[in-house]
Image (spheres, rainbow, N blue to C red):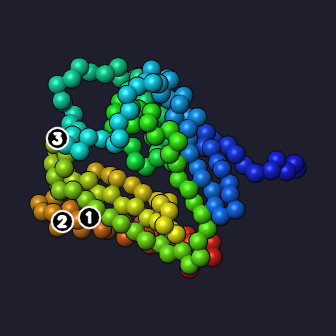
């Protein structure tokens, strides 16, 4: 067995290790993704989705090349390992162009607490009026677990949509708590 020293690159994720923590990012993968879809050097945008933009199944634009679109979505799904902030295809590439150096920095902190945040929208989908539930969990002020998922049912009120989101987040919180206890965290 050979000691190769500190890890710098693993499964496409760049890793910088410091005394007080680590920083993970996917700049090389992002750059190759922009090149693959001929978006390198494109005009950048500050957010992954416009604030007044609603995604819909039929929006009047011509059908995209399905194999290229599926390739793009698969590539973006892989990128969400370190970039939970990305949402919709071509605009995301423009957003990634301007944020290639972004990543997540984890550092050790004494007395870390598991904190969770949850939210939902009511009837947010233009196509079927289903809401979206999302949650984010932090440990020591650093995000480490997140999701955003369309709800399975159409709810009749904002309160019911929020209840579904809270139930999903509570289930995740209990699972994370058990994992942390298993590895010796409180």
Question: Is the Cβ of the residue at disc 2 closer than 8 Å to that at disc 3?
Answer: no
Please name whichever residue, 117 or 63, is drawn nearer the observer in this view of the structure: 117
Name the residue tied to disc 3: 127
Per the model, the C-alpha gap separating discs 2 and 3 is 19 Å
Name the residue tied to disc 2: 160
Splitting the image into 4 quarters, where does residue 174 fall? bottom left
Identify the mark at residue 176; answer none if there is no mark: none
| Secondary element type, mark 3 | loop
- Give the residue drawn at x 26%, y 53%: 132
Name the residue tied to disc 1: 164
**Which residue ends up furthest to the left in the rendered image?**
156
In percent of width and height, residue 83 lies at 46, 47
Q: Earlier in the sequence, mark 2 or mark 3?
A: 3
Q: Does 80 sit left or right of 27 as displayed?
A: left
Q: Does 174 sit left or right of 179 as displayed?
A: left
Per the model, the C-alpha gap separating discs 1 and 3 is 20 Å
- Give the residue drawn at x 34%, y 33%: 91
In percent of width and height, residue 160 lies at 18, 65
| Secondary element type, mark 1 | helix
Splitting the image into 4 quarters, where does residue 180 fall? bottom right
Q: Does 131 sit left or right of 80 as displayed?
A: left
Per the model, the C-alpha gap separating discs 2 and 1 is 6 Å
In percent of width and height, residue 133 lies at 29, 57
Question: Is the Cβ of the residue at disc 2 closer than 8 Å to that at disc 1?
Answer: yes
Q: Does 173 sit left or right of 51 as displayed?
A: right
Please name whichever residue, 27 or 171, is drawn nearer the observer in this view of the structure: 27
Please name whichever residue, 131 or 23, is drawn nearer the observer in this view of the structure: 23
- Give the residue drawn at x 58%, y 50%: 24
| Secondary element type, mark 2 | helix
- Residue 75 appears in the rendering: yes
In percent of width and height, residue 48 lies at 35, 41
Q: Earlier in the sequence, mark 1 or mark 3?
A: 3
């Amino acid at each position: 067995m050979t000691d190769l020293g500190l890890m710098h690159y693993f499964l496409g994720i760049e890793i910088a290790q410091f005394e007080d923590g680590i920083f993970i990012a996917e700049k090389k993968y992002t750059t190759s993704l922009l090149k693959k879809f001929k978006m390198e050097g494109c005009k950048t945008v500050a957010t992954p989705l416009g604030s007044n933009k609603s995604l819909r199944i039929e929006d009047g634009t011509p059908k995209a090349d399905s194999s290229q679109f599926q390739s793009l979505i698969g590539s973006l799904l892989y990128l969400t390992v370190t970039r939970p902030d990305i949402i919709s295809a071509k605009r995301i590439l423009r957003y990634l162009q301007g944020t290639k150096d972004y990543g997540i920095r984890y550092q050790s902190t004494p007395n870390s607490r598991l904190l969770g945040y949850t939210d939902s929208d009511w009837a947010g989908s233009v196509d079927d009026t289903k809401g979206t539930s999302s949650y984010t969990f932090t440990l020591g002020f650093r995000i480490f677990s997140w999701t955003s998922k369309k709800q399975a049912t159409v709810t009749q009120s904002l309160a019911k949509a929020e209840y579904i989101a809270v139930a999903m987040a509570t289930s995740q919180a209990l699972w994370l708590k058990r994992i942390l206890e298993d590895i010796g965290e409180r």
